[in-house]
Image (tube, rainbow, N blue to C red):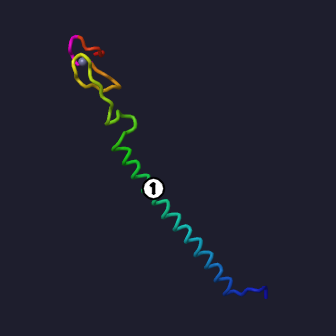
Amino acid sequence: MFGFSLPKLLFTALAIAAVWYGFKWLGRVQARQKELARERARRMKDTGTPRGRAPEVEDMMECPTCGAFVAASGPRNCGKTDCPYPE
Ligand SMILES: [Zn+2]
C-alpha cells in the first residue's frame, strides 16, 4: 500500500510512546533530584545564616573600656560608666 502496514504503524506508535514516557519519567526523576538538592541547600542555609534573622556567627569586638566582647553590628552598653556604646 503506502509502504507501511498496520503492525508497523502500531510498532512505531508504541516506540514513540515508549520514548515519550521514558522522557517523562526521566524528567520526573531529574525534577525530584533537583527538589532534593534544593531542599538540602535550604536546610544548609537554615543552619547557617537564616534570612531575616541575625546571623549565628557574628563579628565580635572588644569594648575598649570594659573589655567585654560585644557584637560589632550592634554594640550595647555594658553598664560601666565610661562605656562608649549607647544604652
Ligand atoms: Zn563596655
* Disc 1 within 8 angstroms of ligand 1 (CB): no
Would you identify the image quadrant in which residue 52 lies? top left
Q: Residue furthest right?
A: 1
Q: Please determine whether, in this image, residue 43 is positioned above or below residue 69.
A: below
Q: Position of residue 84 (x, y in %)?
A: 29, 14
Specify the principal SS of the magenta part. loop
Percent from the top left, x then y, of residue 32? Answer: 46, 60
Residue 30, horizontal then vertical, whole percent: 49, 62
Tell me the quarter of the image containing the N terminus.
bottom right
Observer-nearest of 41 and 62: 62
Q: Is residue 1 left or right of residue 79?
A: right
Q: Residue at x 48, y 64 (%)?
A: 29
Amino acid carrying mark 1 in the image: Glu
Q: Which residue is mark 1?
A: 35
Where is residue 22? Give x, y as percent: 55, 71
Q: Nearer the viewer, residue 46 or 12?
A: 46
The residue sitting at 33% across, 25% down in the picture is 72
